[in-house]
Each structure stands twice: as C-alpha cells, then as structure tokens.
Amino acid sequence: MICEVHVTEPSVDQVRIGVMGGTFDPIHNGHLLAAEEARCNFNLREVIFVPSGHPPHKDVRRISSPEDRFRMVSLAVGGNRFFRVSRIEMDSPGPHHTVDTIGNLIKQYGPRVSFYFITGIDSVLQIMSWKSPLRLAEVCRLVAVSRPGYNLDRIRDLPEEVRASVRVLEIPLMAISSTDIRNRVREGRSVRYLVPDPVHRYLLERGLYRC
C-alpha cells in the first residue's frame, strides 16, 4: 500500500472540481485523456484548465505567448461540456504558483467545493521544490496521473502530509509530450492525432514552433 495515512473524501454535500494547470505549449491528447479519466474516476463536476501565465520554473522567452496557449486550450476543450478554461493566472501578475492559484479558486468558489489538482506523477514527486507544498496538500487533493508499469515506490519518500493527499490515477499508455510535439513541428514531422484537430490547425496557421 502506497499511502499509509488515511484521509476522508469530501462529504456528499461538497462539490468536487478538478484543476489542471500547465504551460500547455501545446495542449495535447494526453492532457485531455488525463482530465477525462480524473473527472470520471473522482466524480468531478467539471475540470478547469488553467494555462500558466508566468511559470516560475520556465524561461518565458522560450514558450509561446499566453494568448496563443490560451487559444489552443480553448479550442481543445470546446467539445466537452465538463471542461472549461480559466484566465486566473494569465490576467494576474506573476510568477504564478499552484498553491496561490488554488487559494484564489477557493475564494471564488467557497467552502462547499473540494479541489482536485491533476498533474503528472513526475511533478508530484518533485512537489517539495514547489512553493508551500504542505499547504498545497492541505487545501486540495493531488491527482498523480501515472501510466501502467510506472514505479510508484518513490511516493513513500514524500512527507506524510503530502502522501495523505495523493490519489494515483493510472491512464492508458500514451507517450505524448509537449516537448516532443514542438520538436516534431521544428523538424517538419506530423503531429496530427497527437493534438486535437483544432489545435493542429491553429499551430499550423500561426506557424508556432517553426524556429
């Protein structure tokens, strides 16, 4: 058993909402699959996609503009009535940290909402390098998206308070990454079926990742 600490799930009168943050440069089908699997497995009312405005661990000069990334996410989630996009980070000065974003969402939605932050298990394993990781684990549940066969033993190395908040979610094997997609575009290789069709058309029309 990975998490020895037991934490009760939200009461029946609480609303569960998923939050998926990220650079989304570009958003791809792996992101959408993870969000949908989390929505179904944890009975989430909706999943809010939060494109990062000024990610603290990345050089903003090397990523696409916030508006391009926001537009691609909007195009990608447009066909799912349970998905929506938030500008909560884009419209506020950065740098932006997950714990602050979740805190602002709690203020917006009120105490009857329980938030589930959806991210890759690799990110969860690095969470102690984030701002106020123990506070983040206290105010939301951490959905660690994994793949079949992924070694979960390292979760035991996290502090007890963080382990208590982690919910592991396995999704079908999809070796898709935004970095690989950008490299493929630069090399003139196809990214069709790796990203949603509207996103594919958008990045071609805008000439994103060509250089």
Image (tube, rainbow, N blue to C red):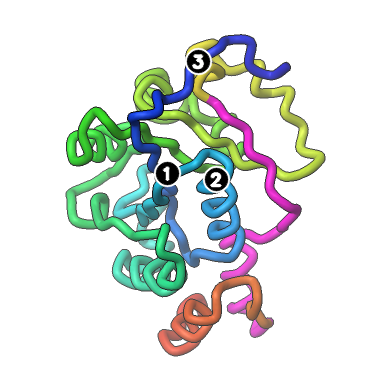
Q: Is residue 42 above or below residue 140?
A: below
Amino acid carrying mark 1 in the image: Gly
Q: Residue at x 57, y 10 (%)?
A: 5
Q: Which residue is mark 3?
A: 7
Q: Which residue is mark 1?
A: 18
Nearer-N-terminus badge (2/1): 1
Q: Nearer the viewer, residue 170 or 131?
A: 170
Amino acid carrying mark 3 in the image: Val
Q: Which residue is mark 2?
A: 38
Mark 3: secondary structure: loop
Circles 2 and 1: CB atoms closer than 8 Å? yes
Q: The magenta stretch spans which residues?
A: 166-189
Q: Position of residue 59 (x, y in %)?
A: 40, 53
Lateral position of residue 162 relative to residue 107, left or right = right
Q: Position of residue 64 (x, y in %)?
A: 39, 68
> Dot 3, crowdedness within 10 Å: few (<14), some or many (≥20)?
few
